[in-house]
Image (cartoon, helix red, strand yellow):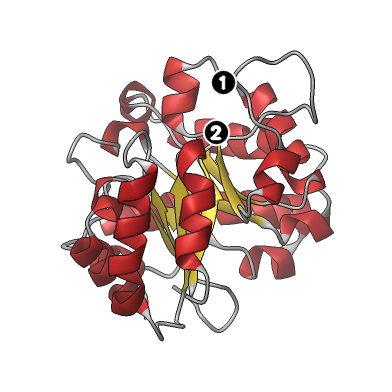
Amino acid sequence: MNKSTRKTVIAGNWKMNMTPSAAKAFITELAPMVAGKDGCDIVLCVPFVDIAPAVEAAKGTNIKIGAENVHFAKSGAYTGEISADMLNEVGAEYVVIGHSERRQYFGETNETVNKRVLAALAGGLKVILCVGELLGEREQGITEEIVSLQTKIALQGVTAEQLKNVIIAYEPVWAIGTGKTATPEQADEVCGIIRGVIAKLYGAEASEAFTIQYGGSMNAKNAAELLSKVNVDGGLIGGASLKTADFTTIVNAAQ
């Protein structure tokens, strides 16, 4: 982390977990555990049905609420989808876009990720943009090419001003939900590659101010070492974000 130039963000991605009542109970338990921890922004990205109760439970705390996806249209015949305006009205501040599970299971492409990013920013949301390589791509030695391409396409049309509302989460697909984790050195290297892409697109000053998270199985045991790396500015946390004690440990590591 480099707190002198950029913001640290610890965000939980609940995926398809927690009912609305469970979400309220979780946040009620978590809030006093992370109160006063102002060394990082704390975000919970939750299922659509949990957003409103989560926002209500988080009122008066330092916990911000986000969504796990957004559609690229403002409205229309897109059964089952949710727009940026809808997320805004129920109180979401952040949205995860391009998670590998969306790409793998639901047909997301680099191009649709870009469309969603633009729609979310136009709708006033802050974006957590996910990029990352498959195991085969890492073994082929093309991690830099894959992650750079994903980043460049996702940010097409994003202005320098809008970039201030974007975070990138590096999520090596081979380390999500597998228990495997990139070494701190691997995480730092790829986050540095992403920072280099930002520098080429937006300049060195924007790059130094840009927050890049690591998101491949960061947990209570490895968070401190991962967060010690200069290019790792936080985490997008999966399973550990469903346990108040573990999530609090990660927030503490970011202080």
* Label 2 secondary element: loop
Mark 2 surroundings: few (<14), some (14-19) or many (≥20) residues within 10 A? many
Please tell me which residue lies in front, 88 or 13. Answer: 88
Q: Nearer the viewer, residue 231 or 253?
A: 253
The three-letter amino acid code for the residue at tag 1 is: Glu
Q: Residues within 10 Å of mark 1 (few under 14, many from 20)?
A: some
For residue 178, what is the image quadrant?
A: top left
Q: Nearer the viewer, residue 78 or 201?
A: 78
Amino acid type at circle 2 is: Gly
Residue 79 rendering spot, x and y as whole percentages: 64, 14
Q: Which residue is mark 1?
A: 108
Residue 139 seen by the camera: yes
Residue 52 placed where, x, y %? 54, 50
**Horizontal side, residue 91 vs residue 190: left or right:** right
Q: Secondary structure at mark 1?
A: loop
Q: Quadrant of the C terminus?
A: bottom left
Query: CB of mark 2 within 8 Å of CB of mark 1?
Result: yes
Q: Is residue 211 above or below residue 142?
A: below
* Relative image position of residue 211 (x, y in whole percent): 56, 63
Q: Quadrant for residue 18, please give it.
A: top left
Q: Residue tagged by mark 2?
A: 98
Q: What's the distance in space between the residues labelled 2 and 1, CA to CA? A: 7 Å
Q: Is residue 218 above or below residue 108?
A: below
Q: Is residue 137 above or below residue 13?
A: above
Q: Which of disc 1 and disc 2 is earlier in sequence?
A: 2
Residue at image coords 76%, 61%: 203
Q: Can residue 231 be seen at all in this image of the molecule? A: no
